[in-house]
Image (spheres, rainbow, N blue to C red):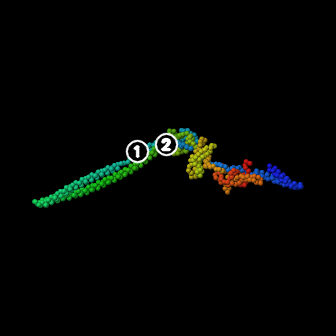
């Protein structure tokens, strides 16, 4: 089409030129036309050859998209709620009668323990039960507090008070008698003094000397008796005071003894209360121990009767055997069962940084044995010394899963919508930062050509196959997302589908 257009233009140009007068002029004009025709042909051929060697690129337009951040980790499928099968501790495992992964019914044999050891352990357990029950009876008998000391002190106090009262009464009676004797002696002496004065004043007839001497002697004797009675009263008062002091001391001593006995009694009652409470607590703990020992005795009795065979407590799948043949059982379960109605979970580890983006309820996918099963995070443990966090995720269904099998876990960390997203392959980086190559059509001497232009961008977030970007990207821009050859800014390119 372009060749015909050029030919027509050449003819029109030739028609406007002055017609040559000579053949040489016509030949020169023909040569010029042929030269331009050859140049055009060579240009078209060169352009076609160059176009055939141009890089071919795939284009994408920025569009709204959702960026999903996820991680992958290797995990192990486990029973969500395994049942531990306990065996009496200290017995030798003779052989296993079931294997991991085996489905069993309730009552099926799991392992065989040494029956003779079970019989000996049962005898020891029964003796220990007797001792524990005796100890429990002692604790239940209670604590008695001796009240004899306080009772004796109370009796002594009452006796001291009675004695004091008796001594005071006797002293008061003696003092009253002495006072009466003094009063009588004083009255008698006064009467004798009156009689003597009367004799001395008697005039008709005057008293004889003998009468006066007798009256004076009687007065002197009465005064002596009064003095003697006064001394007796003084002594009675002193004795009463001494008796009162002695009685007071006796009562005080008896009261002090009673106070001390009462204090000791209260302290004894207090300690007895503590002891009773301690006994109650010890008795409660001992009852629990007795119950455990009774359970152990029942288990040993069942083993002895079954010749040492430990049976499955329910139907399910054997998921673990923790006691090897020839070893002795411990406190931990000897075997683990996954009950028929139990679910499954997958256990995997992530870094502490990744764990901060997860939470209970986060979605996960587990791929195992050619099947993909959805699940949700159930729990995240604390980071270990290596900074790794153990995650447990509950799986939906999982009838095709078996405890112990490996699984590839994909865990979703975040999900965010953005207005401008491009394929991850469209993002390029150099020393100046991130950028994309946009394809623009430009007019050149050879016609319209596709030229690549650098457009700086900022990658907001990337994940999976998409990256969210920000930058001066014109709406509808066509961005290079793939190419069959390396391309850079300013390159001419062709679209992959042209």
The extreme right residue here reads 22
Is the residue marked by circle 2 packed among few (<14), some (14-19), or many (20+) residues within 10 Å? Answer: some
Q: Nearer the viewer, residue 159 or 452?
A: 452
53 above or below 109?
Answer: below
Residue under label 1 = 141
Decide if residue 381 is in sight here: yes
Q: Secondary structure at mark 2?
A: helix
With 54 as the anchor, is 280 left or right in this view? Answer: left
Q: Which mark is residue 296?
A: 2
Q: Nearer the viewer, residue 226 or 285?
A: 226
With 46 as the anchor, is 427 left or right in this view? Answer: left
**For the residues carrying marks 2 and 1, which lies nearer the camera in this image?**
1
User: Residue at left 57%, top 42%?
Assistant: 343
231 above or below 346?
Answer: below
Q: Position of residue 185 (x, y in %)?
A: 19, 56
Q: Nearer the viewer, residue 282 or 40?
A: 40
With 222 as the anchor, is 37 left or right in this view? Answer: right
Q: Which mark is residue 443?
A: none
Is the residue marked by circle 1 packed among few (<14), some (14-19), or many (20+) residues within 10 Å? Answer: few
Q: Position of residue 330 (x, y in %)?
A: 52, 45
Q: Position of residue 246 (x, y in %)?
A: 29, 55
- 2 or 1: tag closer to the N-terminus: 1
Q: Position of residue 145 (x, y in %)?
A: 38, 48
Decide if residue 124 is in sight here: no
User: Residue at left 72%, top 49%?
Assistant: 496
With 104 as the anchor, is 215 left or right in this view? Answer: left
Residue 488: image quadrant is: bottom right
Q: Secondary structure at mark 1?
A: loop
Measure the alpha-carbon separation of dots 2 and 1: 27 Å
């Amino acid at each position: 089409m372009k060749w015909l257009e050029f030919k027509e233009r050449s003819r029109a140009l030739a028609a406007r030129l002055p017609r040559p007068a000579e053949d040489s002029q016509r030949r020169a004009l023909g040569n010029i036309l042929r030269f331009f025709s050859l140049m055009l042909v060579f240009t078209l051929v060169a352009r076609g050859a160059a176009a055939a060697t141009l890089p071919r690129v795939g284009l994408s337009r920025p569009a709204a998209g959702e960026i999903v951040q996820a991680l992958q980790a290797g995990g192990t499928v486990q029973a969500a709620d395994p049942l531990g099968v306990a065996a009496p501790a200290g017995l030798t495992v003779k052989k296993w009668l079931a294997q991991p992964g085996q489905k069993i019914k309730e009552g099926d044999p799991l392992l065989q323990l040494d029956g003779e050891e079970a019989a000996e352990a049962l005898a020891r357990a029964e003796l220990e039960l007797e001792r524990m029950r005796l100890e429990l009876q002692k604790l239940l008998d209670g604590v008695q507090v001796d009240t004899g000391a306080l009772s004796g002190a109370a009796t002594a106090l009452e006796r001291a008070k009675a004695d004091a009262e008796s001594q005071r009464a006797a002293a008061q009676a003696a003092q009253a008698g002495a006072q009466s004797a003094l009063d009588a002696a004083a009255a008698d002496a006064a009467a004798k003094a009156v009689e003597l004065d009367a004799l001395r004043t008697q005039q008709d007839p005057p008293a004889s000397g003998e009468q006066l001497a007798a009256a004076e002697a009687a007065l002197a004797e009465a005064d002596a008796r009064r003095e003697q009675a006064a001394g007796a009263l003084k002594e009675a008062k002193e004795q009463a005071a001494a008796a009162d002091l002695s009685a007071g001391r006796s009562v005080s001593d008896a009261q002090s003894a009673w106070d001390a006995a009462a204090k000791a009694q209260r302290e004894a009652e207090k300690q007895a209360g503590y002891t009773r409470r301690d006994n109650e607590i010890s008795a409660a703990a001992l009852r629990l121990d007795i119950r455990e020992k009774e359970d152990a005795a029942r288990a040993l009795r069942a083993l002895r009767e079954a010749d040492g065979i430990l049976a499955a407590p329910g139907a399910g799948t054997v998921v673990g055997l923790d006691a090897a043949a020839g070893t002795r059982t411990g406190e931990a379960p000897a075997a683990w069962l996954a009950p028929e109605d139990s679910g499954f979970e997958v256990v995997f580890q992530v870094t502490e940084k990744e764990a901060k983006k997860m939470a209970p309820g986060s979605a996960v996918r587990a791929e195992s044995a050619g099947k993909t099963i959805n699940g949700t995070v159930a729990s995240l443990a604390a980071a270990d010394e290596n900074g790794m966090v153990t995650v447990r995720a509950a799986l939906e269904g999982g009838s095709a899963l078996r405890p112990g099998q490996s699984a590839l876990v994909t865990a979703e960390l975040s999900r965010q919508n953005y207005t401008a997203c491009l394929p991850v392959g469209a993002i390029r980086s150099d020393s100046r930062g991130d950028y994309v190559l946009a394809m623009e059509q430009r007019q050149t001497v050879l016609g319209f050509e596709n030229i690549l232009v650098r457009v700086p961008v900022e990658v907001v977030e990337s994940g999976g196959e998409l990256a969210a970007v920000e930058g001066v990207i014109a709406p509808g821009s066509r961005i290079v997302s793939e190419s069959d050859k390396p391309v850079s800014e300013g390159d001419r390119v062709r679209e992959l589908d042209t």
